[in-house]
Amino acid sequence: MKSHQYRNSLFVILLMAVLVFFLPQLVSSYILNVLIVGMCTYLCVMSVYVLLGMCGQNSFAQAGLWGVGGYITANLTIKLDMAQIPSMLLSILGTALICFVLGFAFFRLKQYYFTFATIGLMTILNSLFTNWNEGTGGAIGMKDIPEFGVFGITFSNDTQYLYLYFGLCAIAFLLIKVLYNSALGRSFMAIRDNEIAANCMGVNSLLTKSIAFGISGALCGLAGAMYAFYAGYLSYPTFTYNQSTLYLVMLMLGGTMSPVGAVIGSFVIIMLQEWLRPLQEVMMFIYGVGIIVLMVFQPEGILGGVKSLYDKCKNRGKARIEA
């Protein structure tokens, strides 16, 4: 069953890779820019999926952790003149370590108090981004971040970044699929379903939830590094509480039952932002109403709705055959 799921995932990724390959000839450079930034957003939404969809814990600090990854990369490449790949890896590891350590303090808080703690963390990080001139450039931000390069090849146009970042996102997706079907993933979901029962079965909930927070931090660190190399400039208004809220909206829209939900929700909202650009001033209102309607009529999101429709059609087909 698992090998069948992996084959399906690889087949879908292959189809998407073919589409991405021809995309630069089909769309404008502006749409390519939107899609590249959307891939960074997708990784942050996937980090919410690891915490909420798999482990049952909700965080509003993901945009701040995205910023942490970006600023680590910026400091390493600008101030220490470090190569891009080591900088990216250290951003991933650094953000993951910060989340893992904080997890041991935050997850001592039960129920929704962890969520409140992440709101406090988001506020602290935003304050650091705004006022810490030595580390983040303060209100001015950090500029002149070098473009991504490897083996003497510098990525200097949107097409190259599209191919590179699609590859990184595909790898991240497959790793999360492996995690989903692993013993650690089952421990996450045991805690999500019933933490007391999970503890009785020998799961160390504090350590396991901290690991989940660390993995989500790693995804945000990767997204931050990717964004820093592509944008070349970081500033505090990019990493806000509203952005973290939007990640949750994206995941709930796509569905929390599978990593695929993060893909669907991310790009539906990203494209809606472009299609409804004249309505930007009321977009948060539209998101709010949409989420309320979704939770009332289809709490499992788009993915859950598609699965329900498929199951109904399948059952009807069986009924007709039996008749």
Image (cartoon, rainbow, N blue to C red):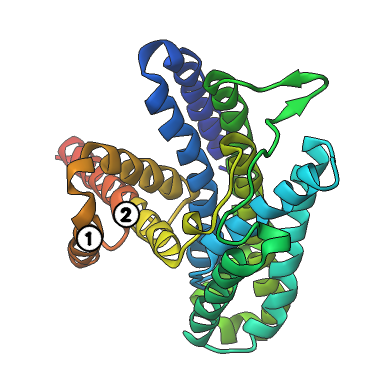
SS state under label 1? helix
Q: Where the C terminus falls, by quadrant?
A: top left
What residue would you read off at disc 1?
294
Q: Is residue 29 above or below residue 125?
A: above
Which circle's residue, 2 or 1, is located before the other in the chain?
2
Give the CA separation, mark 2 to mark 1.
7 Å
Observer-nearest residue: 56 or 139? 139
What residue would you read off at disc 2?
253
Q: Name the residue type under label 1.
A: Leu
Q: Is residue 136 rendered to the left or right of residue 78?
A: left
Q: Name the residue type under label 2.
A: Leu
SS state under label 2? helix
Location of residue 26 in the rendering, given as x and y in whole percent from the top left corner: 37, 13
Q: Write the residue at 32% across / 59% down.
A: 300
Residue 187 appears in the rendering: no
Q: Is residue 312 above or below residue 256?
A: above
Number of dots carrying numbers:
2
Instruction: Please rate how many residues cluster around mark 2, counting C-alpha atoms within 10 Å: few if below 14, some from 14 to 19, many from 20.
Output: many
